[in-house]
Image (cartoon, coloured by chain):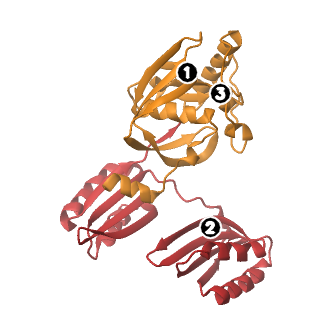
Chain colours: A red, B orange
Amino acid sequence: MSNFVLLSISGRDRPGIVRDVAEALLGIQANIEDSSMTALRGRFTMMLIVGLPEEGSLAALRAALADLEQRTGLTLQSQALSDEEVQARAPTPDCVVTVSGADKPGIVHAVAECLGAESISIVDLSTRTMEAEGDEMYMMALEVCAGEQVDALTAKLADISRRIHVDIEVHKLETNII
Amino acid sequence: MPVKSLITLPDPRLRQLAAPIDQFNAALAELMQDMTDTMIAGPGGVGLAASQIGESARAVVVDCSRSQRPCRNHGMLCLINPEITALSEGKALGREGCLSVPEWVGMVPRARRITVNYQSMDGQRLSLSAAGFEARVIQHEVDHLNGKLFIDRVVSVHDLVRRMDI
């Protein structure tokens, strides 16, 4: 096991959640390495990989988290990461797929099944529902690693677009090193 | 002429406002040649600001004819004291990286069309209009002269959804 721990934390949204969590981590000299934090409706959600100063500080982390949970009412989970997980870098996406249309169950599944069948990895995904002229609009953006399969993927997603009546666009990400 | 080594973050010189050039002499010609050689030697090869080789001087070189993807361009440009005087309201999102910010890339909105006033290597005052990728490169390089990096301008994936779909 490494000195890195994955924390998943969420709570009813209010100003000061990030401060409270960061303060608790700083108190035990834990370093926030990589993180993703976002408000989903009225819930603030955080996923963090934190580095602990040395072996044995896992107990200090657990104690700090228990204290944090009690003081703030946040929901917390922690999981130690393997060395392999820590050293791996998330793959670099080469495409962004955007999906939009009237909300209904099965949109994420249809798109993800198509990607899974082609062994295309999703690096980042976010979805939002929003009101548009009284209707619920659904939007999804995925960053994926399509590699050579980008044209095949585009064709398959066009089929899905027709089948479930949503708009799907595939944008190639070209990086310009300037 | 030597290829200079590029400075990278967190070198503080990347964050400084570069000094205007008022001497149009052999030293300036030498600087521009060094910058051109360094640009051509780099993996991107389409633009370089003097700040990136640690020189505090308002000078950039741009050559979008070297772009891997063909694009409209003015060929090799040496822009002294460049000043972007007009930016189109329309912005395009593009994924940018920078030789001075290794390993990072991000989605950066840039004006699609710009007009830039500048001086040539003999001090003549000129102006040109650029569009598309060349406009992006010039904006990126002029940012360097002002201590700005593309990482200051990145937008999130949520912006990407909004910009593309609405």
Q: Give above or below for B121 relative to B51.
A: above
Measured Cα–Cα span from mark 3 to mark 1: 11 Å
Residue drawn at the location 41% of the way across and 24% of the way down: B129
- The crowding category of the residue bearing disc 2, from other C-alpha atoms within 10 Å (few below 14, some 14 to 19, many at least 20), is few
Pointer 3: residues within 10 angstroms few (<14), some, or many (20+)? many
Q: Name the residue under label 3.
A: B50
Which label's residue is closer to the chain start, 3 or 1? 3
Where residue B110 appears, as percent x and y from the top left, is 45, 40
Which of the pair A164/B35 is nearer the observer? Answer: B35
Left or right side of B132 for A55? right
Structural distance between the alpha carbons of marks 1 and 2: 47 Å
Viewer-nearest of discs 2 and 3: 3
* Image-based side of A22 in relation to A177, left or right: right
Residue A118 visible in the picture: yes
> Which one is closest to the eye, mark 1 or mark 2?
1
Depth check, front residue: A158 or A34: A34
State the residue position of label 2. A85
Q: In the rendered image, which residue does mark 1 sit on?
A: B79
Expressed as whole percent of the image width and height from the top left, the position of residue A141 reads 38, 61
